[in-house]
Image (cartoon, rainbow, N blue to C red):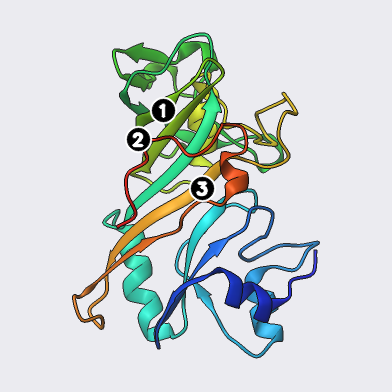
Amino acid sequence: MDIDWPELRARHRLIEDEAILALNKPAGISVTGERHDIDIVAAAESAGEKLYPVHRIDKVTSGLILFARQLSAHGPLTRQFNKQTAEKVYLAIVAAGADPLPETGTIELPLSVGRKNRVRVAAPRETIQRAGDRWFVADADLLDTKNYPSRTEFSVLARDPDHTVLVLRPITGRRHQLRVHLAWVGHPILGDPLFDRSGTTPRTHLHSWRLTLEADWRPDARLALEAPPDDDFWAPLPGPPPGLPPTR
């Protein structure tokens, strides 16, 4: 896919100053590192603009993505992700599943990298345990491979017989964490090409929604960013759920 960078930038820009640029990225466009398709960083560079990704979201994920326009801003911002002090919030529409999710919950399933570089839970699926609103595996059940502690917190925003709308807070920031965690507890994200085989929707219904960071050059020393989902995110439902927290 070719990217018209000036058009994409103008249409999807959320906020910009001398140090950063935030976009509301459409699903299906890579941020960086795409082998066979042009990505945002490459498209910007070809148009004469150098951008430094502060974090990553998957190609199939829509929503908020933050870039530094200066290297001096890049380091302080990325360190907040490394220290897990950046507050990240996603929205997802998942399959309701046979076992409904509780109103709030925590998924603490360590991740590892398996065959073909695919991210998976670092234990056999049948060893996953649930205690109330928490999913976990015992240390004795971990596979004999390098694993990465991973924690996702969620709350239910809305339900219907087929779908559940979730607010997700990835406390850690592992690759594919939200997608793997939800799939392995029986509630794959709708349209996820890795885990949803239903073929009922043309896109993945995972959206990077809110991000809060310290930013000492800003007047209030913080960035509180929000990317509203487009209509296509809500397409499996009659519309946005009435309980959607207001834009801040």
Q: Which residue is mark 1?
A: 158
Q: Is residue 57 visible?
A: no
Q: Amino acid at mark 2?
A: Gly
Tag 1 or tag 3, which sits nearer the N-term? 1
Q: Given contact means CB atoms under 8 Å apart, are the residues at marks 1 and 2 in contact? A: yes
Residue extending furthest toward the left: 220
Residue 45 position within the rendered picture, expressed as x and y whole percent measured from the top left: 66, 83
Position of 66 relative to 245 (above/below):
below
Q: Quadrant of residue 245?
A: top left
Q: CA distance from mark 1 to mark 2?
A: 7 Å
17 with respect to 201 (left or right): left
Q: Quadrant of residue 118?
A: top right
Position of 224 relative to 230 (above/below):
below
Q: Amino acid at mark 1?
A: Ala
Q: CA distance from mark 3 to mark 2?
A: 17 Å
Residue 232 position within the rendered picture, expressed as x and y whole percent measured from the top left: 63, 46
Q: Is residue 169 visible?
A: yes
Q: Amino acid at mark 3?
A: His
Residue 134 position within the rendered picture, expressed as x and y whole percent measured from the top left: 31, 21
Which SS class for mark 1? strand
